[in-house]
Image (spheres, grey):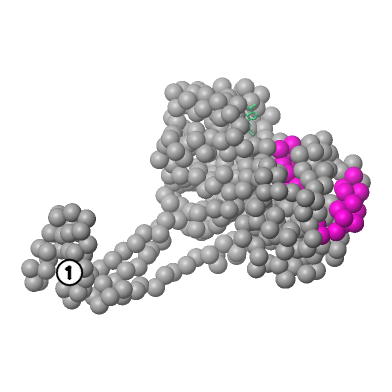
C-alpha cells in the first residue's frame, strides 16, 4: 500500500487521490442503459433473461412466496436466529428514536404553520446478493420502512444458484412480515422497481446499496422516472484516522473488513505516526492470508493507500475532503477531534469500536453514502422513508394581518391573480 506525506501534496494531488475508481465510468453507464431499456420494453421476460445471463439461473418463477419464505426461514440455525433477533431489536430501538413530532407555530397573528409526517406509500428495497448475500442490509432497510408505515414494500435480491434465496434472507423477510422476495438483482432490479413490470409494482422510492451496476442504475432512474432514490450507496469504503495510541492489529482488521466487500472497495489509513502505518501494514499482511475472501481484499487493498499527517487536525482535513462512508477514529484522543468532522457517513469512536458493529448490530444504519456523497447525503434513517408535508391555517384576523404583505409582494412580481386571491378575501368578511 502506497504511503503519501500530506505536507508534500498540493491541492491538485489531493483532489486526484480522493477520486474513487468508480467515478465517471462510461462503460458501466452504457451497459446499465441497455439493461434499463430492455426492462422497460420486455418487463418480466427481460428480468428472466438477465437472471440467466448475469446470475446463471434459469428461473421458473420470479419470486419466492410467503409459504416458501416460512419453510426456508425454519431451516436456519437457532443461534443465527438469535443473532438476527438481537440485531433486529437494536436497529429497531435506534430507529424508533428518530420519530419526531414538530410543534405548530403562529408565525404572525392568526397565521399557523406546521409540518406532518406521512410514510412514502410504495418503497423498493434492494438487498445485495452478488459476491455476498447481505441479510443485514435487509434489516437496515426493512426496519425503518416498517416503523415509518410504508404500505407496500417490494424486495428484490439476486437469485442464488439454486434459483431461490438463502434461509437468512427468508428469516429476515419473515420477521419483517414481507409477502414476497423477487429474485431479481443488479441494474434490472432497479429498473423493474422504477418502471414496473407485469409482476413488480412500480415504487415511489428505491433503497439499498449495491455494486457499480446497481448504483449507476439508481443514479439514472432518479432522473428518468419519477421514482426517487435514497442515495448513491456503492462499493464500501473506510477511512481510519489513527494516532500513536491506535492498536495496529485493530487498524489492520478494520481496513480488511471493508476491503473484503469487493475488489472496488477502498480502505484508507491516515495516521500521525509512520510507526503505526508500518505496524498496521505488517499486521494486514498477516491477517489477510487467512481470509477466505483474500483475493478480493487484496485487490481492494491494491486500490487503497496511507497518508502520513502531522496531527489529528491535519488528518481530519484530509478526511473531510475524502468524505468517507465510514470514519474510524482509532485513538484514545478521539474526543479532541469529533467537532472537526464535517463529511462522513457514519463514525466509529475509539479503539474498541469496530466498524463491523455498525454493519450488523449496534443499531445504526449501514446503508451509507459512498464516493464522497457523504458531503451532501445522510445515510438511510427513518427520515428516508417519510415525507414532511407543510400545513397552514389563516384566520379572519390572520388574513387582515398578513394579506397586505402578500398583495405587495404579488404586485412587484407582476402576478395579479396571486394578489386577487388575497384581495377577494380582504373585501369579504365571513
Ligand atoms: N454503501 C453501502 O451502504 C453498502 C452496504 C452494503 C454493501 N455495499 C456494497 O454493495 C456491493 C454489493 O455488490 P455485489 O456485486 O456483491 O452484489 P449486487 O447485488 O449489488 O450485484 C449483483 C448483481 O450485479 C449484476 N451484475 C454482475 N455482473 C454484471 C455485469 N457484468 N453486467 C451487468 N450486471 C452485472 C447481476 O445482475 C448480479 O445479480 C459491494 O460493492 C458492497 O461493497 C455497500
Ligand atoms: N459495510 C457495508 C456497508 O458499506 C455493510 C455490510 C453488510 N454486511 C457487512 N457489511
Ligand atoms: Zn461491511
The residue at 50%/65% (across/down) is 99
Q: To which quarter of the image does residue 389 belong? A: bottom left
Label 1 element class: helix
In the rendered structure, does residue 413 fall within the stretch colored magenta? no
Q: Nearer the viewer, residue 400 or 393?
A: 400
**Percent position (x, y) of residue 44?**
49, 26
Tell me the magenta residue range.
258-285
Q: Nearer the viewer, residue 93 or 242?
A: 242
Which residue is painted at 79% across and 36% down in the image? Answer: 299
- Can you tell me which quadrant of the image ligand 1 is in? top right
**Viewer-nearest residue: 191 or 67:** 191
Total number of numbered discs in the rendering: 1
Give the labeled residue for mark 1: 404
Residue 88 visible to an observer of this rendering:
no
> Residue 97 vs residue 20: left or right?
left
- Above or below residue 247? Residue 224 is above
Amino acid at each position: 500500500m502506497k504511503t503519501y506525506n500530506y505536507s508534500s501534496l498540493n491541492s491538485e494531488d489531493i483532489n486526484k487521490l480522493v477520486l474513487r475508481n468508480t467515478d465517471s465510468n462510461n462503460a458501466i453507464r452504457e451497459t446499465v442503459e441497455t439493461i434499463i431499456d430492455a426492462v422497460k420494453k420486455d418487463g418480466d421476460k427481460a428480468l428472466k433473461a438477465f437472471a440467466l445471463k448475469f446470475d446463471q439461473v434459469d428461473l421458473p418463477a420470479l419470486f419466492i412466496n410467503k409459504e416458501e419464505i416460512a419453510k426456508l426461514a425454519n431451516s436456519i440455525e437457532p443461534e443465527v436466529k438469535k443473532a438476527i433477533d438481537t440485531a433486529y431489536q437494536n436497529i429497531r430501538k435506534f430507529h424508533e428514536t428518530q420519530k419526531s413530532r414538530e410543534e405548530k407555530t403562529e408565525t404572525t397573528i392568526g397565521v399557523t404553520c406546521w409540518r406532518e409526517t406521512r410514510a412514502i406509500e410504495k418503497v423498493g428495497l434492494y438487498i445485495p446478493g452478488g459476491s455476498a448475500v447481505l441479510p443485514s442490509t435487509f434489516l437496515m432497510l426493512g426496519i425503518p420502512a416498517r416503523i415509518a408505515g410504508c404500505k407496500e414494500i417490494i424486495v428484490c435480491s439476486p437469485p442464488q444458484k439454486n434459483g431461490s434465496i438463502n434461509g437468512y434472507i427468508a428469516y429476515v423477510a419473515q420477521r419483517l412480515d414481507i409477502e414476497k422476495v423477487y429474485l431479481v438483482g443488479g441494474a434490472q432490479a432497479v429498473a423493474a422497481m422504477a418502471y414496473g413490470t407485469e409482476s413488480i409494482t412500480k415504487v415511489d422510492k428505491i433503497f439499498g446499496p449495491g455494486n457499480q451496476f446497481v448504483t449507476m442504475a439508481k443514479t439514472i432512474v432518479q432522473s428518468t422516472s419519477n421514482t426517487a432514490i435514497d442515495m448513491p450507496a456503492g462499493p464500501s469504503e473506510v477511512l481510519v484516522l489513527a494516532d500513536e495510541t491506535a492498536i495496529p492489529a485493530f487498524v489492520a482488521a478494520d481496513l480488511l473488513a471493508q476491503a473484503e466487500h469487493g475488489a472496488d472497495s477502498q480502505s484508507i489509513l491516515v495516521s500521525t505516526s509512520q510507526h503505526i502505518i508500518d505496524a498496521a501494514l505488517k499486521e494486514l499482511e498477516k491477517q489477510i492470508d487467512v481470509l477466505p475472501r483474500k483475493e478480493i481484499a487484496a485487490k481492494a487493498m491494491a486500490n487503497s493507500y496511507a497518508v502520513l499527517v502531522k496531527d489529528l487536525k491535519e488528518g481530519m482535513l484530509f478526511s473531510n475532503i475524502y468524505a468517507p462512508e465510514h470514519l474510524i477514529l482509532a485513538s484514545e484522543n478521539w474526543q479532541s477531534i469529533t467537532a472537526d468532522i464535517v463529511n462522513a457517513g457514519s463514525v466509529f469512536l475509539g479503539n474498541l469500536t469496530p466498524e463491523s458493529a455498525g454493519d450488523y448490530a449496534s443499531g445504526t444504519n449501514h446503508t451509507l453514502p459512498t464516493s464522497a456523497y457523504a458531503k451532501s447525503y445522510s445515510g438511510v434513517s427513518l427520515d428516508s422513508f417519510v415525507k414532511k408535508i407543510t400545513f397552514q391555517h389563516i384566520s379572519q384576523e390572520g388574513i387582515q394581518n398578513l394579506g397586505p404583505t402578500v398583495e405587495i409582494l404579488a404586485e412587484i412580481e407582476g402576478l395579479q391573480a396571486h394578489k386577487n386571491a388575497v384581495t377577494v378575501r380582504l373585501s369579504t368578511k365571513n
